[in-house]
Amino acid sequence: MSYENEIYQSSSSDPAHDRSRALDDLRYIRDTMERAGSFTAVPGWGTAAMGLTAVVAAGLASRQPTPDAWLLTWFIEAALAVAIGVSAMIRKARAVRAPLFRGAGARFVFGFCPPQVAGALLTAVLYRAEMYEALPGTWLLLYGAGVMTGGAFSVTVLPIMGACFMVAGLGSFLAPAAWGDAFMAAGFGGLNIVFGIIIAKRYGG
């Protein structure tokens, strides 16, 4: 390319267009950084819905005549909660155009899942030992630990939420065994509803 052509192309560029394009790029970068800073993979409304189903499950579980029927009630609730949570996470990530399995979403999932696997294994151990009264405290503690570790690099409300679940789990261990379903209703029900609403209103649904 000749020197004259270079001069011509430089002089023919539109400074106003270049400035507008630069501003658009900066706006996109700023919006992306804001979404990354405030996005949490935990779905607020989905978490609140999980809390509502847990309150119903606690009422049903407390009426079951046998430990096996009680445990089956909570297993059904756990499966329903997983379905609600996963679908709500996907909808939330799509709504804010944030990747679910990268960044904040991946950090939460990989931090949350190991304590839940530990909870499933301990459930089998405690069931075999017929230590049913220890299950509510175990579930609350490990769920809380998962929320704390999963949310350690996310918004501040998640570690606080996890700590509240762990306190509820400790309370369940210290209280009479007959109060197990009440603690489950307060934890998986009440805490999920309260924190779910907070997350929904402050962090994009």
Image (tube, helix red, strand yellow):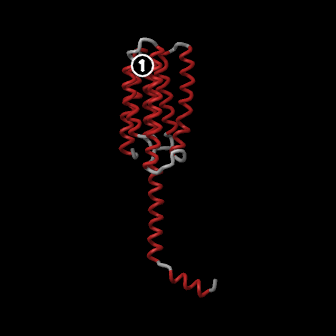
Q: Residue at x 51, y 33 (%)?
A: 146
Q: Quadrant of the N terminus?
A: bottom right
Residue 23 % position (x, y): 44, 67
Decide which of 179, 8 is in the foreground and name it: 8
Residue 162 % position (x, y): 46, 33
Helix, strand or loop under label 1: helix
| Horizontal side, residue 7 vs residue 198: left or right | right
Taking the view exactly as shown, the residue that stands out farthest to the bottom is 4
Decide which of 74, 39 is in the foreground and name it: 74
Q: Residue at x 39, y 31 (%)?
A: 51
User: For the image shown, how many numbered marks are present on the structure?
Assistant: 1
Residue 138 % position (x, y): 50, 23
Residue carrying label 1: 180
Residue 64 versus residue 153 in the image, above or below: above
Residue 67 % position (x, y): 47, 14
Q: Quadrant of the C terminus?
A: top left
Q: Residues within 10 Å of mark 1 (few under 14, many from 20)?
A: many
Q: Residue at x 36, y 35 (%)?
A: 194
Decide which of 155, 126 is in the foreground and name it: 126
* Kind of residue at disc 1: Gly
